[in-house]
Amino acid sequence: MRWGVIGTGWIAGVFSDALAESKSAIRHAVASRDPARAEAFRGAHGFAVAYGSYHELLADPLVEVVYIATPHTSHLQDTLRAIRAGKHVLCEKPLGVTMSECRRMVAAADKAGVVLLEAFMYRTHPQTAAVLHLVRSGAIGTVRAVRSCFTFDLGSLPPSKSQVRTNLAQRGGSLYDVGGYCINFSRMIASDEPNRMAGQWSIDPDSGVDRSFAGVLGFPNGIVAHFDVGFHSAASASCEVVGTTGRIEIPHPWWPDRSHPSITLHRTGQASEAVACEGGWIFTLEAEHMADVVQGHRAALIPAANAIGNARVMDAFWRMMHGTARTRLSGPMRPAAAAAARARSLRKPAGRAAGLRRKPKRP
């Protein structure tokens, strides 16, 4: 498949280099609003064509699928334009910053008959499949808790990699930058949508964005998930799923080892067991997964509608932090959207709880 890349930031470069390892991908075109940046990116990452506008790339009939790596608040506009141009779209996370944005994109893709996916690359890795298999097979009994974290030091990155992350108007901050991973993982394991939440955070005095965030999610099925993210501390990334008879430790959940990833299974009264998983580079696996879905070889591991649930939680936390809400989620997901979001990995509808009102079911 011929790929077009919109955006020339760091993550766009990582993904573009991964395309070179994919058997199904052809690096065709890259676009930036700055023609010089587009040309420099083309030469550095092996693309055939560089465009000085997004419109030119979308008008290129050879581009079949577009990877969008623009700032969070630009995803809605850039994705809708790509869909209108008849392109399949893999959009960087978060797909949208609110439920409404995500619904608009999902509806537009459905109407146009194109594939739209949110780029949670860790979901396409065999390690994630192994974790889900252990959980669903009852290897640790009934799940009670989910713990996860993702932190790093923003000061260790070049300024060009930190500008969007510290831009309040573009929903910068650690919650939208890396918190989506932990929220997505928690929802995946719980197989449910949260109906209770609490959070604490630290706001950077200069930029106004959250430099660290800790959240707790309660689910109708009794599972409690807690996570912490940030970008003003040492790097850390891990997950743990705790059940009634055991627990699973995932030391590298977001960027698993390419060659020999493994997780550890602890079961009460038994010796700990290292569970070896198949390897692979997550971004290459993500590109191949997208191609498989477009070509009808498989169903999406994480349908686009799943992004609605993540946006619901992140937007609620955002409003808590910035004074437009206190402790409540914005409301239950619409029945149709909730059903689609739970496809394959989610099962039960959101329940009733303080701060969450259930809308009547549609006939």
Image (tube, helix red, strand yellow):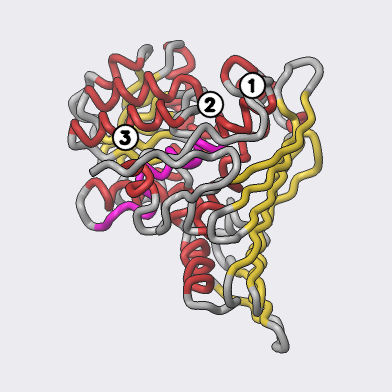
Q: CA distance from mark 1 to mark 3?
A: 31 Å
Q: Which residue is mark 3?
A: 106
Q: Please name whichever residue, 308 or 280, is drawn nearer the observer in this view of the structure.
A: 308
Contact between marks 2 and 3 (CB within 8 A): the answer is: no
- Image location (x, y in percent) of residue 170: 57, 19
**The N terminus lies in quadrant:** top left
Instruction: Specify the quadrant of the image occupied by residue 163.
Output: top right
Q: Residue at x 28, y 55 (%)?
A: 299
Instruction: Specify the quadrant of the image occupied by residue 204.
Output: top right
Q: Residue at x 68, y 51 (%)?
A: 226
Q: Residue at x 37, y 39 (%)?
A: 334
- Residue 47 sits inside the magenta stretch: no
- Image location (x, y in percent) of residue 264: 65, 73
Q: CA distance from mark 1 to mark 2?
A: 8 Å
* Sequence-first tag of 2 and 3: 2
Q: Amino acid at mark 2?
A: Gly
**Above or below, comparing residue 109 to residue 354 in the picture:** above
- Image location (x, y in percent) of residue 5: 38, 29
Specify start and end residues of the magenta stretch as a single range.
Answer: 298-313
Contact between marks 1 and 2 (CB within 8 A): the answer is: yes
**Above or below, comparing residue 296 to residue 57 in the picture:** below
Q: Which residue is mark 1?
A: 160
Contact between marks 1 and 3 (CB within 8 A): the answer is: no
Q: CA distance from mark 2 to mark 3?
A: 25 Å
- Image location (x, y in percent) of residue 178: 62, 39
Q: Which residue is mark 2?
A: 9
Q: How many marks?
A: 3
Q: Please name whichever residue, 245 or 43, is drawn nearer the observer in this view of the structure.
A: 245
> Which secondary structure lies at badge 1?
helix
**The C terminus lies in quadrant:** top left
Q: Amino acid at mark 3?
A: Val
84 on left or right of 191? left
